[in-house]
Every structure is written in structure tokens, then in C-alpha cells.
Image (cartoon, helix red, strand yellow):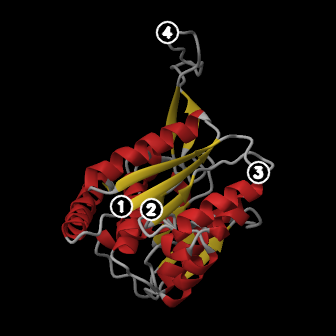
Amino acid sequence: MSAKVLEGKGLAQHLRDEIAREVKLLREHGRPVCLAAIQVGEKPESVLYVRNQRKVCEEVGIAFRLEQLPGTVSQNGLLHVIEELNRDPSVHGIILQLPLPARLDARLAQRAIDPRKDAEGVHPVNLGMIVYGVTQRAPCTAIAAYHLIKSVGLDLYGKEAVVVGHSQIVGKPIGLLLLHDFCTVSTCHVATRDLAAHTKQADVLVVAVGKAHLIKKEMVKPGALVVDIGVNRVPVLDDHGQPVLNEKGQPKHRMVGDVDFDGVKDVAGWITPVPGGVGPLTVTMLLRNVAEAGKGVNH
């Protein structure tokens, strides 16, 4: 058996085309859609995220606005900027770039964002609405993984689903979403005593813990649908197990998931690659959340 590889790019492009049409229609009716990003300081990874967000927004016609704050900004200063964006009718989505400086409370800042403008779907109100099956402005990564699962066309009713990882914005929301399809859902985490005993029972296996190649071939049920959300940076090794160096004499790295792709693809029915699986859809769900807010879609 060789698994069907679930690339997220095609599904992401289809959704982006749909979003672009909706945004264009809103703009023609005098309602341009805008995403505001708040960046504290200038950490390289945060600068890269902002650049990518600006690019994808431009692709679908969403205006992008950057609120660049100094690394010395106070908690109250940050909350003041968020409140201003909450009150600004021209802004439909707000995203807070993480990580913040350690002295700032990221959760407090995220809770200050108007739930209707919560582009990432991480406000407690939006997280809580998943219990009711409402997915407008759901957490981007969780809803991206769920869309990939649904794209397969598998009848989920009565299926055994195992989610490895119980984070508030990925693992727990995915478990709730699968419950709405009447899956029997188990959630595994750091305190799970025998992980393989659970994963081998899964018809649908979702992994999101950030541990490279945690899930091996022998831990997967033949024919399972495997969704790998983990993103891990590991060194590139040569045939002798030694690090491969770049032209500057520094170790090369590559991105891998939480699933041993090369091994698991031989037993799974479907599998997502890393990179290229859930990732492209995650950014698209951010755009979808902003577009939904622009249309005035509420819970």
C-alpha cells in the first residue's frame, strides 16, 4: 500500500479564488476589506511572517495595514493600539504577531481583540463557539486540518479519531470539530502512557506536538488518514550521519513533520506532507476569517 499524498496547495488555491471573488464584490460595493497586523519589535521571524501576510492579502485583494510598535512598548500601550483598531470601522481583521517580548502578556493582548475581528480565531469567544459547531473565525491551523480531512470524502460517522496534542488552538479544536462528525475522538498528550496503543486504533490520526518523526510506521493503522501538523527544523545529514554544511560552513536544515513520512506513507491510506500539507491552507483560513468579518458574518 502507498498512501495518497494530500497536498494543501490545490485546495488552498481554490479557496483563495473564492475569497478573492467575495472581496472584489465587497470592494465594488464600497466595502473594502482590511487586515491589520500588530508587530512589536523587529524579530526576523516576525518580519518574515508580516511580509508573507502582506503578499497573500494582496493576492486576494485584502488591504494590509501594519502597526509597527517599538520593542519597548508597555502592556497598556499595546492594549491601547488594539482598542483603537477595534474601534476603527475600516479594519475587519486583527492579527497579533508572536512571539511578544517576554515581559508582555500575549494572552491578555489576544483577549483584548474584538472577537468579530479576531483573524486567527484564538479569542476565547471564537474557541468556545466551536462547541456549537460554529467555525467562522475558528483557529486557522485547526480548521485547515479539518478541511483537508473533509476533502478526502471519507464518511467520518463512527470512525475512530485520535488527536496527538491538546493545545488550545490546534489539538482541542480539531477534536471538537471531529466530534461534530460523530467520530469517536481520543486525545493523547504528554501524560499518555502508551501512545502507540491509541494511534494504532485510529482511522483518522491528527498529530500536532512539534516533535520530529514521533509517529512511526508501526504506530499507524493500515489505510488510516494521517494529518501531520507538526513543523520541525532538523539538520541535514550525509550518508555517514554527519551534518551537511552550506557554503558558509554552517549546518544545513530541513523542515519535517511529527510523522515519519517515508515510513508511514507505506501503510497509511492518505497522508499530508511537511511542508506542503496543512501549511498552505492555514494561511488561507486566515484570509477566510478576515473576509467573513468583512461580509459582516457573525456567530
At mark 1, the secondary structure is strand
Q: Is residue 6 visible?
A: yes
Residue 6 pos. (x, y %): 33, 57
Separation of residues labelled 4 and 2 (CA atoms): 36 Å
Counting residues from the start of the chain, the first of labels 1 and 2 encountered is 2
- Amino acid tagged 3: Ser
Q: Residue 44 falls in which quadrant of the image?
A: top right
Can you name the residue that lies furthest to the right here? 103
Q: Earlier in the sequence, mark 3 or mark 4?
A: 3
Q: Position of residue 84 (x, y in %)?
A: 58, 64
Q: Earlier along the polypeptide chain: callout 4 or callout 1?
A: 4
| Number of numbered discs visible in the structure rendering | 4
Instruction: Say whether disc 3 or disc 2 marks the residue closer to the N-terminus.
Output: 3
Labels 3 & 4 near each other (Cβ < 8 A): no
Disc number for residue 226: 2
Which residue carries the number 1 mark? Answer: 270
The residue indicated by pointer 3 is 74
Residue in view at x 59 percent, y 15 percent = 250
Estimate the spatial distance between the alpha carbons at disc 4 and disc 1, rounded to whole Å.
Answer: 37 Å
Q: Nearer the viewer, residue 49 or 85?
A: 85
SS category of the residue bearing label 2: strand
- Residue 236, position in %: x, y? 53, 26
Residue at image coords 60%, 18%: 242
Q: Which amino acid, mark 2?
A: Val
SS of the residue at dot 4?
loop
Q: Secondary structure at mark 3?
A: loop
Which quadrant does the N terminus fall into? Answer: bottom left
